Image (cartoon, grey):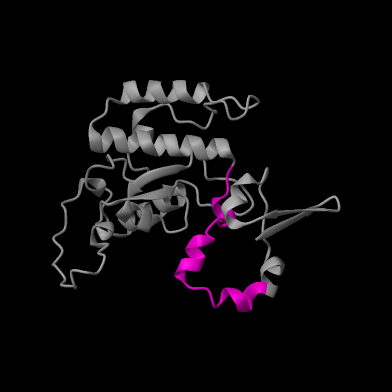
């Protein structure tokens, strides 16, 4: 249960109604401290039932969430299902323009990408997300036995598996989860970036290449 106090009034929101809050609210450490002993006893089911909050790093306005979802959807549709980019892009733009959530908001915003390669290519190696990272040969991974009843996430560990990544690292002081910053990219490329920006990652790679006299 979340209790919002404003102007001497209280508004209660159980987890299944948290989406009805009319603005973003931040639960600071002091809001949680008194509940720590209870939260420690929660099992996975309780955490799942109450998973209505997100880290402030991932916060965004509704329009950014919609546009980000659209960009990622276009990327997958085009690169993995062979959908024509120009056609689906035009359809998505039309839908965004006709949004009826808030008449004061005009979509698409200036953050929405306009070029195919901006959407469908990995931000780091600039190769299609449907191809191997940097077009390098696919490595052969030995099979590891495990019981048939266990869920396997082995495919997620492949170098070219796609992951959600951010061109600029997320920051608590700024809303960066938007259509200009969120992309699908290769796992290898995403891991290489860690928590750094694309520019910092490229500077690091350039230094390594020079250190090994691989500049050509």
Between residues 1 and 144, which one lies in front from this camera angle? 1
Residue 109: percent from left, percent from top: 54, 28
Q: Is residue 46 above or below residue 212?
A: below
Residue nearer the viewer, 77 or 14: 14
Instruction: Please count the marks in the image.
Output: 0
Q: Is residue 126 magenta?
A: no
| Quarter of image, res 172 | bottom right
Stretch in magenta:
35-60
Identified at 36% across, 57% down, the residue is 192
Q: Quadrant of residue 114?
A: top left
* Displayed quadrant of residue 100: top right
Q: Residue at x 57, y 49 (%)?
A: 59
The answer to whether residue 169 is left or right of residue 74 is right
Q: Quadrant of the N terminus?
A: bottom right
The reply to whether residue 179 is in sight is no
Instruction: Measuring from the top left, give residue 126's x and y in whole percent.
Output: 32, 40
Queried whether the magenta region covers residue 46, the answer comes back as: yes
Residue 77 in the image, given as x and y percentages of width and height = 30, 34
Instruction: Please name the residue shown 36% across and 33% down the image.
Output: 74
Question: Looking at the picture, how far across and down is residue 60, in whole percent?
Answer: 58, 44
Compared to residue 39, the image places residue 131 above or below, namely above
* Residue located 28% across and 49% down the image: 215
Q: Is residue 42 visible?
A: yes
């Amino acid at each position: 249960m979340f209790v919002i106090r404003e102007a001497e009034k209280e508004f209660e929101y159980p987890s299944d109604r948290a989406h009805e809050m009319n603005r973003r609210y931040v639960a600071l450490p002091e809001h949680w401290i008194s509940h720590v002993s209870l939260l420690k006893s929660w099992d996975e089911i309780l955490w799942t039932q109450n998973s209505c909050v997100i880290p402030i790093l991932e916060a965004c306005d509704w329009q950014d969430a919609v546009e980000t979802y659209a960009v990622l959807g276009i990327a997958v549709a085009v690169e993995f299902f062979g959908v024509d980019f120009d056609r689906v892009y035009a359809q998505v733009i039309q839908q965004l323009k006709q949004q009826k959530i808030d008449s004061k908001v005009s979509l698409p915003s200036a953050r929405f990408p306009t070029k195919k390669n901006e959407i469908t290519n990995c931000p780091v190696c600039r190769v299609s997300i449907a191809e191997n990272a940097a077009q390098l040969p696919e490595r052969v991974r030995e099979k590891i036995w495990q019981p048939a009843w266990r869920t396997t996430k082995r495919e997620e560990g492949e170098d070219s598996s796609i992951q959600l990544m951010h061109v600029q690292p997320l920051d608590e002081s700024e809303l960066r989860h938007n259509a200009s910053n969120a992309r699908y990219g290769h796992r290898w490329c995403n891991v290489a970036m860690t928590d750094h920006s694309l520019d910092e990652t490229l500077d690091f790679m350039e230094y390594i290449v020079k250190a090994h006299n691989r500049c050509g």
